[in-house]
Image (tube, grey):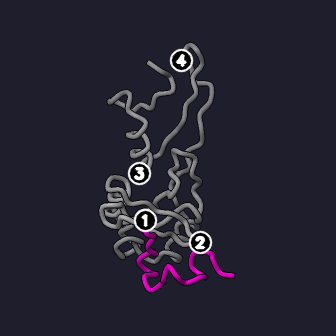
Amino acid sequence: EDRNTARLGWLGSISDRAATLAGCDAGITRVDLDQHGVPTAVSATKRLFTGAVRKAIIVRDQCCIKCGAPASWADCHHIIHHADGGPTILDNGCLLCRSCHTAVHHQGWEVIMGHDRHPWLIPPATIDPRRRPQPAHNRRTMRLDDPHVMGTAA
């Protein structure tokens, strides 16, 4: 078995996609092994948005960015997944309730960080064939043609 394969206790090897999805809601620790299977290094696990960073995301987003569910019902989502090297910082996090978090991971929704340092949602082509970015729920009065929104001001 390849030593670079992700594994879950009591389950064994899992696909890269499964590891990415699991990593969004769980801590991941990298353990490097030598040729004899002996650990040579263990990574620090810091992937959950806690303390001041979570509070800052709550102040900015106020609620689930997709549906408006209360912040207390929401998880902080890594816009660039932690497993892909996304940092656990304000500009890489947003609030998503469990249902909307599932939609982002499994139904083709994407989240991007706008030039305004607020998260924007990109719907799947089945909902909007042009995939036009939508502002976060607490900013739905924003217009895409507003030159200050997406950093196109002169």
Between marks 3 and 1 in the image, the one whose residue lies nearer the viewer? 1
Q: Nearer the viewer, mark 2 or mark 4?
A: 2
On whether residue 54 falls in the magenta region, the answer is no
Q: Residue 154: name its quadrant.
A: bottom right
Residue that appears at 52% across and 82% down: 145
- Label 2, on which residue? 117
Tag in front: 2 or 1: 1
Real-space Cα separation, disc 2 to disc 1, in angstroms: 16 Å
Q: Give the distance between the C-alpha atoms of the residues marked 3 and 1, in whole angstroms.
A: 22 Å
Residue sitting at 39 percent across and 44 percent down?
A: 22
Q: Secondary structure at mark 4?
A: loop
Disc ID at residue 37: 4
Q: Position of residue 83 (x, y in %)?
A: 51, 44
Query: Which mark identifies residue 25?
Result: 3
In primary-sequence order, the first of circles 2 and 4 is: 4
Q: Amino acid at mark 4?
A: Gly
Q: Which residues are magenta?
A: 131-154
Which numbered dot is residue 122?
1
User: Does residue 150 show up magenta in the picture?
Assistant: yes
| Amino acid type indicated by mark 2 | Arg
Report, in whole angstroms, how far the alpha carbon at label 4 lies from the one at label 3: 28 Å
The mark that comes first in sequence, 3 or 1, is 3
Circle nearer the N terminus (2, 1):
2
Gap in Å between the C-alphas at discs 4 and 1?
43 Å
